[in-house]
Amino acid sequence: MPYEEKRAWIMGVVSAVAYAIYVAVVLGRARDSWLTDVPYAWLMVTTIGAAIVSTIVVSIVAGILSPRTRSTVDERDREIGRLGDRIGQSFVVLGGVAGMLLALIEADYFWIANIIYLGFFLSATVGSAARIIAYHKAFQTW
């Protein structure tokens, strides 16, 4: 398995786990109150930070364990990476636009922050999935 594909798996899985933990904790805290009353900010910052650090650490470990694949990035790997970036960035843009629209209608900060976080999560997971699919299907560079 190419190192870039391993990195896609790592980012996708770590992002999904971090977001699932965040959602589970927020929903668990909201049992007896409104969702917008739940303290979420510190939890959000912590899960995002933990996901970033975990992705970096696990990627380094994967690189150490497979040094031969780490240094062999070819044109196909770069094209697949660009494809995943383009697909993933579209969700960052959608999350940003949705957050801006929520701010314009003066929605609660909870909804604004969470729609942007959802955009980050979708960017990482869908972008990673696009990379993984491209590695396993006949990927045509144009």
Image (cartoon, rainbow, N blue to C red):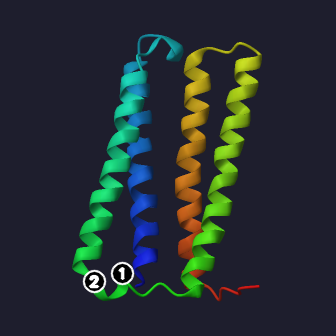
- Image location (x, y in percent) of residue 103: 70, 19
- Image location (x, y in percent) of residue 118: 57, 40
Seen in the picture, residue 49 relative to 113 is either above or below; the reply is below
Q: Which residue is mark 1?
A: 70
| Label number found at residue 67 | 2
Q: CA distance from mark 1 to mark 2?
A: 5 Å
- Residue type, mark 1 in image: Arg
- Image location (x, y in percent) of residue 120: 55, 44
Q: Are marks 1 and 2 in contact (CB under 8 Å)?
A: yes
Seen in the picture, residue 60 relative to 35 is either above or below; the reply is below
The kind of secondary structure element at disc 2 is helix
- Image location (x, y in percent) of residue 100: 72, 27
Q: Nearer the viewer, residue 10 or 38?
A: 10
| Label number found at residue 78 | none
Seen in the picture, residue 33 relative to 29 is either above or below; the reply is above
Report crowding for label 1: few under 14, some 14 to 19, many 20 or more residues within 10 A (C-alpha): some
Task: Judge from the rendering whether residue 24 lies leftward or rightward of residue 132; answer left or right.
Answer: left
- The residue shown at (65%, 53%) is 89
